[in-house]
């Protein structure tokens, strides 16, 4: 439950904020543990104005904003600036309205005695589980500034990979969108007129090639689905008068999409969807390399921060973004719990290549797992960059060839029968 509270500190200052707790008593106990005296605690039953959407700043922080914040906070802590003062200064400097709101709340929590990791944990949309757990590990080891530097590097790497993927997908998405619009435009407005010409030339019993018949049937279906009619008084102006087929098709697609998305959000649906992605030829390679790079860098950072292997595996599995590989890591954690080295279950993994297990084994023998995994992460992040650049270079000519083939097929379906019928008429 979400609660709103007011409390006084040991030096008489009044603080306020919101916090999640299982019950009011649990929050009171937490506030007392932090050394503050609660004055007012009440359940927040949706009385506060929503921050996102039209009523306030959207609840979103860009990765670049998070990188800048992380590096600046690390620098200020290294320079000896008190944590609360550092957070307050960064709050004033932030250009993101929602980030300022978040930092304001975190500053109040830190001033009231809450650990920084716990304050971050209240905002999972901004600070991931990996981020929070690494900060907590840094607090326990007294190396928060070093941990924040590691986190900034890790977030930068994730942002770089996402940027490359978005850049590679931009061109295909634009071309595909234009192709779909052009296809429906041809099917709705051009092919019906050409079909009428073919019927006028050859009559209702005219023999047409199979691909021309298929094209005309597709066009007929599209026209009937949108129920486009022409009013004689308006000439060639099309209108949509009756939409039973369109509503039926649109309704079925909408229902299927809603239930499909809901199912994918469940644990079972997400697992099956991720398993399907790992069966697709090119997608499998990209996802696997990204997962290995993310696993290696995250696990190395956690191990370098002094987190235990089991805790590091638990956090890293959730950060990979693929339920199938996460399940493999959970199984590996059970074997590690039983005394086996991590390299043993990784060597039997269906998705981790042998080189990862071999380098893990070297790291275990030398006691430098974090160093070895960092090198693995660097290697696979470079592999991902090269792979994405290669795919972007290949996709463009493939789509051009595909569009050319589609245009050629439509032209052959139309011009061939017209030429043949014209010859028959001439003879």
Image (tube, rainbow, N blue to C red):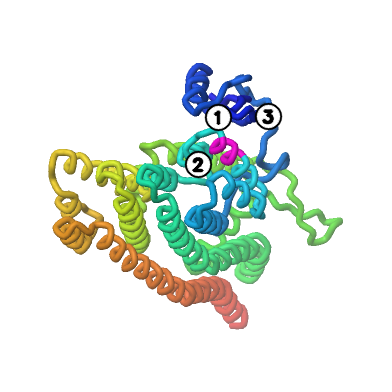
Residue highlighted by disc 3: 48
* Residue 4 appearing in the image: yes
Q: Is residue 304 above or below residue 407?
A: above
Of the numbered discs 1 and 3, the one sitting upstream in the chain is: 1
Q: Nearer the viewer, residue 213 or 9?
A: 9
Element type at marker 2? helix
Q: CA distance from mark 2 to mark 1?
A: 12 Å
What is the magenta range? 105-111
The location of residue 41, given as percent across then percent down, is 60, 20
Residue highlighted by disc 1: 19
The residue most toward the front is 11
The location of residue 316, given as percent across then percent down, is 34, 48
Label 3 neighbourhood size at 10 Å, few (<14), some (14-19), many (20+)?
few
Quadrant housing residue 410: bottom right
| Main SS, magenta residues | helix
> Residue at horizontal 62%, vertical 51%?
89
Q: Quadrant of the C terminus?
A: bottom right
From the viewer's perspective, is the residue at label 2 or at label 3 nearer? Answer: 2
Q: CA distance from mark 2 to mark 3?
A: 21 Å
> Residue at horizontal 38%, vertical 37%?
267
Q: Is residue 186 above or below residue 294?
A: below
Residue highlighted by disc 2: 120
Element type at marker 1? strand
């Amino acid at each position: 439950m979400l609660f709103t509270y007011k409390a006084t500190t040991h030096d008489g200052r009044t603080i306020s904020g919101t916090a999640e707790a299982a019950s009011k008593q649990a929050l009171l106990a937490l506030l007392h543990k932090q050394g503050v005296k609660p004055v007012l605690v009440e359940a927040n039953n949706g009385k506060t104005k929503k921050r996102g959407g039209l009523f306030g700043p959207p609840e979103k922080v860009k990765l670049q904003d998070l990188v800048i914040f992380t590096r600046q906070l690390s620098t200020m802590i290294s320079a000896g600036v008190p944590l609360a003062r550092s957070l307050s200064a960064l709050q004033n400097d932030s250009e993101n309205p929602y980030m300022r709101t978040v930092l304001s709340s975190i500053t109040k929590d830190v001033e009231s005695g809450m650990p920084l990791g716990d304050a971050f944990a209240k905002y999972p949309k901004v600070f991931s589980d990996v981020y929070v757990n690494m900060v907590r590990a840094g607090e326990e080891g007294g190396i928060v500034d070093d941990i924040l530097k590691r986190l900034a590097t890790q977030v930068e790497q994730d942002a770089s990979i996402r940027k490359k993927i978005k850049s590679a997908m931009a061109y295909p998405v634009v071309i595909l969108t234009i192709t779909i619009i052009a296809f429906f435009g041809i099917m709705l407005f051009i092919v019906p007129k050409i079909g009428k010409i073919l019927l006028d030339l050859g009559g209702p019993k005219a023999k047409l090639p199979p691909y021309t018949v298929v094209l005309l049937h597709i066009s007929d279906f599209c026209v009937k689905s949108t129920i486009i009619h022409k009013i004689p008084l308006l000439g060639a102006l099309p209108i949509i008068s009756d939409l039973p087929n369109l509503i039926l098709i649109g309704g079925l697609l909408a229902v299927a999409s809603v239930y499909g998305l809901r199912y994918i959000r469940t644990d079972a649906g997400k697992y099956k969807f991720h398993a399907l992605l790992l069966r697709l030829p090119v997608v499998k390679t990209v996802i696997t390399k990204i997962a290995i790079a993310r696993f290696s860098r995250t696990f190395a950072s956690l191990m370098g921060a002094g987190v235990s292997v089991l805790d590091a595996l638990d956090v890293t599995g959730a950060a990979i973004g693929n339920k199938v590989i996460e399940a493999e890591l959970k199984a590996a954690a059970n074997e590690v719990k039983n005394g086996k080295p991590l390299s043993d279950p990784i060597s039997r993994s269906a998705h981790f290549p042998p080189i990862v297990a071999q380098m893990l084994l070297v790291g275990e023998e030398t006691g430098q797992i974090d160093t070895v995994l960092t090198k693995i992460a660097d290697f696979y992040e470079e592999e991902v960059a090269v792979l994405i650049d290669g795919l972007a270079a290949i996709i463009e000519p493939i789509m051009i060839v595909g569009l050319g083939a589609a245009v050629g097929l439509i032209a052959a379906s139309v011009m061939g029968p017209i030429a043949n019928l014209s010859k028959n008429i001439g003879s």
